[in-house]
Every structure is written in C-alpha cells, then in structure tokens.
Image (spheres, helix red, strand yellow):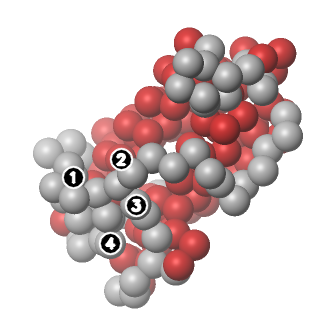
Amino acid sequence: MPSIDELRQRISANRQRLRDALVAAGSKWESADDEGWTPRIAAEHCIDRDFSLAGIAAAAQRGEPPAPEHATESDVDPATKLPLATAAEAIAALERSGAASDSTFGPLSDADLSMEAALNVGDALPNTIEGVMTLAAWHLNDHAQQIAKM
C-alpha cells in the first residue's frame, strides 16, 4: 500500500502532466481524435472528475455520502457540466481543482487511507480514501497522456 505522501505526490505530478498537456493543446483545442475526444472534452471531463473525487473524499471525512454533483459512475461519459472554452480556462480550472484536492488530501495521515469512501468503480479500486486518491492520480495521468497524443 502506498503512503499518503506517495499518493499526494502522484496526484501532484500527474496534475502537472495534465497542465503541461493543456498548455501544448491550445491550438488544437477543438480537434477530435478517432474516438471523438477533443482536448477540450478530455479537459472538461478530467477536471470535473478531479473536483468530484475531492468532494467524495471530503464527504467521507465528514462521515456523509457525497453530494449528488460528486456522484461517480464507472462508465466514461464525456458529457460534462464544466465548460472550458479555451486551454487557458482549463488551466485556471485545474488550479482550482488542485486547490480543492490539496485542501482535502493535505490534512490526511496514513491511518486515514482505509477510511470508507463512496467510490463507485466496482471492484477496480477499494471504496476507501486510498481508492479515491489512487483514481485521482491515475485519471489525471490518463487524460494528460490522451491530450498529449492529440
């Protein structure tokens, strides 16, 4: 099991990878790949999910179910409620999601990793803070790589 510090570092490093990909994607913001994803759609989806994962973890820390806007699904749905018209808007939103993530995960200790969280991804990850943080790190990196290839 990774430590809380290792998970925070993965999230931070992968957020930086996404930021770098967003900076490079400015001129092709609306250009779709073979699957119909554009850098804009990927950024909107990923950053919205970053906010949601922080919300799920924050609710878990309070012993509450996540707010409806933070409910998760295991299926990828590129539809989003976070419109980002430009790469610059996406970078600003990523900074805000990073601040939300840091304020949620920052005060945690290794003992908190096993805290139950309402992560709805089937058996792919544990329904714990560790699972939420693992997904956050993976998801940021996955979409950073996706955008970088576009």
Identify the amino acid type marked 4: Ala
3 and 2 marks in contact (CB < 8 Å): no
At which x and y percent is residue 120?
Answer: 31, 64
Residue 80: x and y in percent read 65, 54
Q: Which mark is residue 6?
A: none
Secondary structure type for disc 2: helix
The image quarter containing residue 36 is: top right
Q: Say which label, 2 or 4, has the lower sequence index.
A: 4
The answer for how far apart the CA atoms under marks 3 and 2 are is 12 Å
Q: On the picture, is 124 further left or further right than 91?
A: left
Q: Sort mark 3 into few (<14), some (14-19) or many (20+) by Cα contacts within 10 Å.
A: few
Q: Amino acid at mark 2?
A: Leu
Element under label 1?
loop
The one of 2 and 97 positioned closer to us in this rendering: 97
Q: Position of residue 50 (x, y in %)?
A: 54, 52
Is residue 19 shown above or below 145?
below
* 1 and 2 marks in contact (CB < 8 Å): yes
Labels 3 and 4 touching (C-beta < 8 A): no
Instruction: Report the side of 50 relative to 89 (left or right).
Output: left
The amino acid at mark 3 is: Glu
x, y percentage for residue 48?
A: 61, 53
Label disc, if present, on residue 118 of the rendered structure: 4
Amino acid type at image mark 1: Leu
Q: CA distance from mark 3 to mark 4?
A: 11 Å
Find the distance from the CA under tag 1 to the CA under tag 2: 8 Å
Q: Residue at x 20, y 49 (%)?
A: 124
Note whether residue 92 is visible: no
Q: Which residue is mark 3?
A: 73
Circle 2 residues within 10 Å: few <14, some 14–19, many ≥20: many
